[in-house]
Amino acid sequence: MNLSKRAAFLIVPVLLASYVLVAVAVYYAERSSVERLEQARLSNKLTELRSTFSVYASFADSYLFALSESEALHQFLLEQDNSYRQQALGSKLEAALGNLTRQRSDYLSFTVFGPAAVPEFYFASTDNPFSEISSVELDQARQAWLSGGLSGVSLERTETGDSLLIHHKLIDRRTFAAPLATQRENSVLVQIAVELNAFDQQLAELVEAYDARVTWSEESGPRPRLLEHEVRLLPSLYLRVEPDERFVAKQLTTLAQGLAIGALVLSGLCALLLTSLMRRFITEPVAELEHQLNDVMHGQRNRIDIQSRDEIGRLAQRFQQLYGQLSDAYRRSRELAERDTLTELPNRNHFYEMAVRELKAASDHGYHVALLYIDLDHFKFVNDKYGHSVGDALLKSFSQRAGVLVKQETERSPRAGQAILARLAGDEFAVLLYRYQDENHCERVAQALLGLVEGGYRFEMGSYPVTCSVGIARYPQDGHTITQLISNADTAMYQAKNGGKNQVAFYSQELARQARWSLEIEHQLKAIDFDEEFFLTYMPILDGRGRIAGCEALLRWYSPVLGAVRPDQFIPIAERTGLYSKLDRWVIAQALSDFAALSKMIGRQVQLSINLSSAELTGGDVDRYIGEQIRLLSVPAEMIEVEMTETVGVDASRQRDQLLHRLRDLGLQIAIDDFGTGYTSMMQMLEYPVDKIKLDRSFVERLMLPGNFALLEPIISLCHARGLKVTAEGVETEAQAQALIDSGCDLLQGFLYGQPMRLAEFELWLQKHQRDTQS
C-alpha cells in the first residue's frame, strides 16, 4: 500500500471525527452564547421596562409635589365659599395643572379628597367633559384615609386592564404641610393618578416575544431560574417574567441540526478532495517542502523556495499575496475605525481609548492631565450660507493648523509633555494634554488655538467669521474619568460662549454652580406669575442744575424660590429661551400705567425711559403694542423714551432700522444705552435714528482717568453736533458730576442722586429732594 492510500485511510476517519468534535464544541459554545444572549436581551428589556416605570413614577411624584405647593391649591383650600372654590379657584387650579401637563400619558387625573375620602375637586386630562373619578381611584383614596399614613404610592389595574399609578399625600388645610396625627379631620388628601400607557405596551410586547408568564408580588420571590428575571418597581411591588422553556430549546434544535448536516457534508467533500489530490499533488511537494524546511532549520538557507509550477506552488503564491492583502486591509480598517475620515484625526472612540490609558497612567504615577474642549463659533452659519464643501474644507484646514500648533507647543519645552488632538463630532474638537509639568501649559495651548481664529478664520477658500470657544477641565480636580472631564470641559466651553465667544474658560465648582443656577432661573421663568414676582423700580435722571428731567423704569424680580435675582442674570436667559417678548410687554404696560402717578408726584410730565430687549429690535411688532398701550392709557408719546443697548448695532439690520423708524413715527424718543461697552465705532452710532446717547458707567470711569479725561468734552461735543443729548450713567461722586457738567453733559444718573426705587419710595425721595433743593 503506497503513501497516498495509507494517507487516505488515516485522514478520512480523523477528518470525520474532527468535524464531529468541532460541531459538538461549536454547539455547546453556541448553546451557552444563545442562553446568555437571551438572558441579556430579557434583562435589557426589563431594565427598559423599569426605566419606563421610573419615568412615570418620577413624573407623578413631581406633579404631586408641584401641585401641592402651588398657590392655586392653597387658595382653593383656604376659600370657604364652595361655589367660588369650584368655579374660580377650581378653574385656576385646573389651569395650573394644565400648565404642567406635557402629554406624558393618555390619562392623568388630580383629585382633592375631604375627610372620609369625599372628592372636593377632580380634574382629568380627557376629552370627555363629563368624566368622573374611577372606582379604582376612589377605593385607593379610602384605603389611604384608613391606613393613617401621610403619603403613599401604588400600582392598580383599571376595569379595562390598564395600569394606573396612584400617588397620594395628606395636607393640612391651614398649614399646607403634613398634618399631625390629631389633626387629620382638618386635612385633605391630594391624589395624582397616571395611566402607564408606554409601560403596558412594553410589557405586552415582552410577553408576546417570549410567550412569557408575568407574576406580580409584594415581596421578592426565590432566586430566578434560567431566563427568569425579576425587577423591583415599588418598595412593595415586584414583577417576575418567566419565558416559555421551549423558547430557547427551539433555537438550539435548529442549531444542532445545521451543525450536524454541515459536519457530514464537509467531511465527505474534504475526504473526496483529499483522496483525489493526495496522489498527484501532495507526496512529492511535501517531501520537497520537508527538505527545504530542514535546510532552513539547519541554517543552510534563508527562505523556502517553491520550485514547482503546479497547483500547490501557485496556491502558495496566491496565499502569500492574499496574506499581504489581508494585512494591508487589516491595517487600513484599523485606521478607518480609529480615524476621522475628513480630518484624519483620531475619532471619538479612539480618543476615548487613548484618554482612558493616559488617565490610568496619570493615576498610577501622578501625572498632570488636561482636556481642552473646542467648539467653532458660527460654523453652522458658514456651513448653511456657503455650503458643506466650504464647511468641510474649513474643518480640514483648521484641524491641520491646530495639529501643527499643538505639536509646536508640546515640543517647545521638555516640561510640556505630550498631546492628542481629536475630532469628536461636527465642529467640536478636543485636545488631551498629559504628562506635562508646567501648570500654565494648558492655558497657553488654549490661547494659541484662539490665535488661529483671531478676527475670523482665513484660508485658501476665503475669510469667514468663525472663532472658537475653549473649555478646560483638569485631572483630578475636575473629574477622574474621561466622561467626567469631557462633560465638565463642555460646561466650561459653554461658559466661554456665554462670555462673548472666542474665549477660554476653566471648569470650576463655581462654574457648575452658575450652570445649575441658570437652569433653575430658566425653570422658574417658565412657571412665573409676572404680577406676583416682578415689579418696577424708578431711578431719577437730573439735569446740570439738579432738577428732575426724567426717570428710568428698571425691572426687578424677587422669586419665592430663588430670592432676589439680578436683571443681568435672568434677562439673557429670557432672551435665549424666547420669553423676552412677554417680559418687555409686561414692563411696557406697567411703566405706562405708572406714568400718571409719576407725573403727579413730580408736578409735571417728565421723560420716562423704558428698556427694550435687544432681541425685540430684530423682529416682532413691539411698536404696535406700545402704540396700543399709549392710546389706551392716554400717555403722551413724546414723553416716552425707548432705550436699546449699543451691542445690537454691531451687525446692520434692515429689520432693526425699520423698527426704530416705526417707533419714532409713534412720537417716541430713542436712546442708545450702555454706550462704550460694545464694539461699534462712534461714527456708526451717530448714524442711527436716535435722540440720545447714554454713556455707560464703566465708560465714564475710564474717561475720568487722567490719560483719557481730555476725550470727554470732544465726545460730548460730537454728540451735540449731531443733535443728540448725552446722559451719563453711574455718577456716584460730586467730582464726577461736576466734571461731566463742565464738559457739557446734559443729564446725570447715578447713586449720587438716587438708586432704583418703587413708587412709594420714589415719592419719599422726591419730597426730600424738593426740600433740599428749596433750602
Image: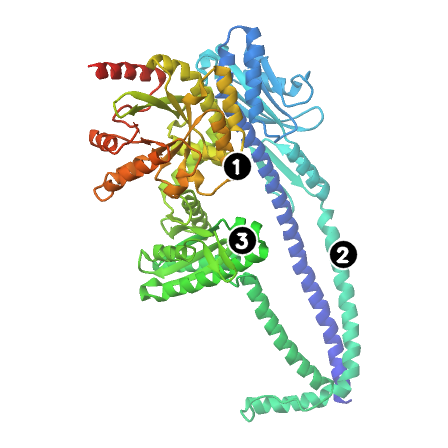
- Closer to the N terminus: mark 3 or mark 2? 2
Label ID, residue 435? none
* 503, 390: nearer the viewer: 390
Q: Residue at x 76, y 66 (%)?
A: 262
- Mark 3–mark 1 CB contact (< 8 Å): no
Q: Residue at x 45, y 58 (%)?
A: 355
Looking at numbered disc 2 in the image, what kind of residue is underneath it? Thr
Left or right side of 7 for 486: left
Front position among marks 2 and 1: 1
- Closer to the N terminus: mark 2 or mark 1? 2
Asked which secondary structure carries label 3, the reply is loop
Query: In the rendering, at what x and y percent does residue 569 appear?
Result: 40, 33
- Residue under numbered circle 2: 254
Image quadrant where residue 295 sits: bottom right
Crowding around mark 1 (Cα neighbors within 10 Å: few <14, some 14 to 19, many 20+) is: few
- Residue under numbered circle 1: 655
Looking at numbered disc 3 in the image, what kind of residue is underneath it? Gly
* 148, 753: nearer the viewer: 753
Q: Is residue 673 visible from the viewing direction of this image?
A: yes
Left or right side of 228 for 380: left
Looking at numbered disc 1 in the image, what kind of residue is underneath it? Gln
What is the distance, in whole Å, between disc 2 and disc 1 at their CAs? 71 Å
Query: In the rendering, at what x and y percent does residue 725 appear?
Result: 35, 30
Count of marks placed on residues: 3
What is the distance, in whole Å, between disc 3 and disc 2 at their CAs? 46 Å
Query: In the rendering, at what x and y percent does residue 307 appear?
Result: 67, 91
- Residue under numbered circle 3: 426
Q: Residue at x 58, y 54 (%)?
A: 387
Above or below: residue 331 compared with residue 129? below
